[in-house]
Image: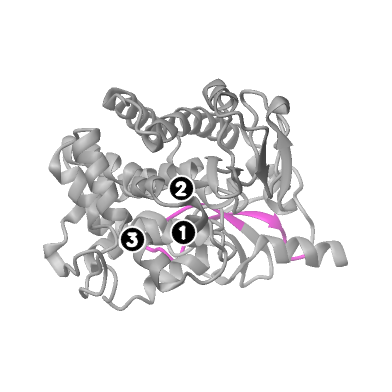
Amino acid sequence: MRSINVSDLKPGQRFDKPVYVDGDSILVPERVPIRDKDIERLQRWKVKAVTTEGALIKEGHEEPQDGFLQQALRSPGQQAVKKTYSAVAAKLSDLFNRIREMDTVSIAELDSIIDHLFHALDERKNDIIQFILYGFQGQAGFVENAINCSVLATMVGRNMGMVKHKLLQLATASLLHDIGMLRLPQEIVDKKGKLAPEELKKIRTHPIHSYKIITRELRYPEEIGIAAMQHQERWDGAGYPRGVAGRNIILPARIIAVVDAFEAMVSERPYRGSMIGYAAMRAILSDNSRRFDPEVLKVFIRTMGIYPIGSIVLLSSGAIGRVIENNVDAPLKPAVKIIINERGREYAGDNGETLDLFTEKNLFIAKAVDPKELTAAREAD
């Protein structure tokens, strides 16, 4: 770890790893801005320096992106989604910090975030799906994970025909389902190696902490708290904290279980890297009614497609394309924009031909391609 003098800290600074006081007490998580209040507290405690394994994130810094996604990620739609996420994440980071410190939080502030996400989904659903899968380049943090889960759960709930007030409850529960993690030791939450039995036991208390925060501190309805408490329960009863099974798990929790698992797979975690969307979908599909409600899983597949929007795919013709639209009735036959044609011509301006594989009867997807591998292969040529 490197040491940073408190006198050098400035409000708004963010680091790509957590910042600690005394080596083990977290000051702020990764990518969460340091506030005036944080600096004042350190000065009051007479703390001279803090530590981190990370680096300062420079203002306006862009994460490196894979070459074949750059044009798509720079599109007006993706830039609009990025702006929305940045605004929502800043608000949610502040709220989560206040919840961690047991400061007062108004549910009106959380409700306004849900309203913002609903509006964004109405305007740019496909762009949001692509941004969740590839916009973060596997670098989404705790706050972004919460937003992603809320967005994905809302899409599934809509496709299941949920009425508005139930949909709002689902969106809220999925936004807050892991909030109990804020009350656990950060060194356990961020641990890269295998958890010791006692550490695992503590981690498995987080749904109960989530329930208590949601119902007792935020005073949301009981159903929202129960959905958060049950999101780690499993269809076959092998989950935690209560070992509830089947339809004894309420529907919002069964939806959150699916989207939380998928979102975790496409995001990096301290203990592993991220998957491409297709690999995550395959992992979810291999469940065989162990972890997930089969009916919820069917709706999730219809919502996302086997090849989620933004996926890079190799076609039977030898061309390479990017999935831009899913076909609800034929999940293996999405619409694809060509980025490299069968003769090897690259469309650097993202202006390749668009093909609907549902109507192109002689074309099919041969396999999904990891953008990182594709970029490396092209650079080696």
Give the structural element (helix, strand or loop) at label 3: helix
Residue 233 - label: none
Q: CA distance from mark 2 to mark 3?
A: 14 Å
Residue at image coords 24%, 40%: 214
- Percent of width and height locating residue 200: 39, 67
| Residue at the spot of label 2 | 145
Q: Nearer the viewer, residue 196 or 356?
A: 196
Is 361 a magenta residue?
no
Which stretch is magenta? 322-343
| Residue at the spot of label 3 | 258
What amino acid does circle 3 point to?
Val
Q: CA distance from mark 3 to mark 1?
A: 10 Å
Q: Quadrant of residue 73?
A: top right
What amino acid does circle 1 point to?
Ala
User: Does the rendering let one see residue 360?
Assistant: no
Residue 264 - label: 1
Residue at image coords 35%, 42%: 175
- Position of 364 compared to 285: left or right? right
